[in-house]
Image: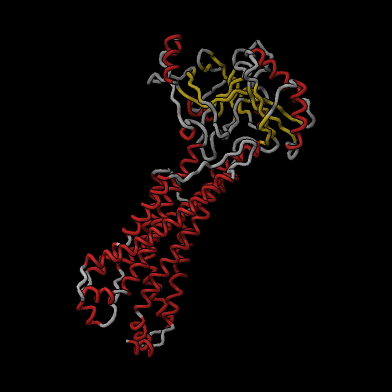
Amino acid sequence: QAAAAMRQLAVDYPESNATMTADVLPFWRASRGPQGLLLQGLGVLQGVMVVLLLAVCGNTANLVLARATGRTREMGVRLAVGAGSWRIARLLLVENLVLGIAGSVVGVLIALWGSNALRAVPIMSTQFPVRFQTSVNEVGLLFAILLGTICAVLFGLAPAVQLARVAPHSVLRAGSAMAPSGGIRHVLMGAQVALALVVLIAAGLFFQSFQQTQDADPGFQPRGVLLAAYDLTGRGMDGAESKMFAERLLTRLRTLPNVEAAALATSIPLDIHGLPARSFSLEGRANTDGTLDRSLSNTVTPGYFTAMGIPLLAGTDFAELSDTTLPPQAVVNDAFVQRYLEGGDALGRWIAIGETDYRVAGVVRTSLNESFGEPPTPVIYLSYRDRPSRFGEMHLRTKLGDETMLAPSLRHAVREVDSALPIYNVRTLTQHVEMNLALRKIPAQMFLVLGPMILVLAAMGIYAVVAYSVAHRTSEIGVRIALGATAAGVRRQVIGESLRVVLAGALVGWALIAYGYTQFLRGTLDPVVFAGVPLLLLVVATAACWVPARRASLVDPMVALRAQ
């Protein structure tokens, strides 16, 4: 329908609409606004979920391998009495399959409960609450069960193949379980450590980004500003009437007690909808490819920069709304000057937007517009005088701490100007900014939960492998102690052998995330995260190794040798 409407406009107005097209996009694919940041966080979260699943599967595989080693004699007997290798492998795979399906069912129940909980709790508590519209449908259930089944079969293959290839005569002749081979378990432990380090560093980066965002300077002063919206659409006002209303409203708002500045704007920086973008041509700048440049834009009244606390670097503010002597005006930010004029003088230049030419009257400091962490983005500010709007956001700057108390006076002042006009979405600029911060806060909070979880899983995996290895080396350790080895020496040996595997896995994980972070995200390696997190993991891994190592150092040599 949108395409058909655009084709009809091209027929009716060929001069202006011949090349114009339209595209209808879902909100998450909007070309402006902070949705991209949230989608990036959710994409990383999906990857982390895969890593978390692999870590759990690694633990499970280690436990299954340990259990398989303890069943070596049982499987040798089964093979000796006529069971085939495929029958042994099938038995073990079926056991793992039952465990995998049971785990998937539990996971589905938790997902159903969690989806209801996410829908019930808004992520942004405002007059227009934003919630996660989550649901678990038949496709999601089938995917979860299928994923659990695949994991069960995949990580049950190693012990199944290991036991299916057991030689019955060697097992029965030995009279006990064969000594386990630690190669596969060490590989799994190293891989788990690598995955854990990737998740922990990602969690550290997200948390650090959120902390830095809270302390970041947005380029304006959010404290002390009250916001409220109005909309005159549907009243049949033309541009001149809309401008006259804005002038009357501002005159009344500026007389309110303790109001230091008042202004109107069609958009607010760091809004979930973002700022609109406009194509333009700039005097003195030629594009070799023949296309127009694009910049974010906002339509504001005089006094907007004072109300927002955005410093004026050069030139002047907009002319008053009633001024008819000056040509259409524009104010650009410093990022606009740096990108399109390479730091040259912007004052007095003409900017053509559509069929109107605007003269640059001033240059202001660059501030955040779409989201925290964005690069310096060019913005063109246009005046309500030249582009009157039927809707707007009122900006009232007052003394710090008084902005919330100003709301009743604001409502009364608007009723005096137009008794039938409702205002809505009354909030402080600080609350508005916190809505944008929520898009960073959500991934940071999720990673704060996932980080300790993956750390605990890694510690459990390391402990399981080391404890099982020590249990099978009891006789060897007893002989060493009988020959004069000290308890401290035994602990050092067990911990040292295990930490070599941990260090190898940690090095692989560190290299992977460091390469991805520097090459794809263009970030710099922060020493606090990229050195502190591996150190924390090594401390936890050492603690996980120390418990079974201490148990091994307390072995009574006589008991161990008697058992042998």
Q: In this view, does 402 lie to the left or right of 458?
A: right
Quadrant where the N terminus sits is top left
Q: In this view, does 518 lie above or below 537?
A: above
Quadrant where the C terminus sits is bottom left
User: Residue 149: where, in percent of width, then height?
Assistant: 35, 56
Q: In this view, does 278 lie above or below 495?
A: above
Q: In this view, does 421 lie above or below 161?
A: above
Q: Is residue 228 left or right of residue 142?
A: right
Decide which of 271, 155 is in the foreground and name it: 155
User: Residue 408: where, in percent of width, then height?
Assistant: 77, 32
The number of discs equals: 0
User: Residue 468: where, in percent of width, then height?
Assistant: 37, 74
User: Residue 110: where, in percent of width, then height?
Assistant: 49, 54
Residue 506 in sight: no
Quadrant position of residue 365: top right
Decide which of 324, 444 is in the foreground and name it: 444
Residue at x-position 36% and y-position 81%: 474
Residue 190 in sight: yes
Decide which of 55, 189 is in the foreground and name it: 55
Residue at x-position 41% and y-position 67%: 462
Residue at x-position 44% and y-position 66%: 460
Q: Is residue 27 left or right of residue 326?
A: left
Decide which of 150, 312 is in the foreground and name it: 150
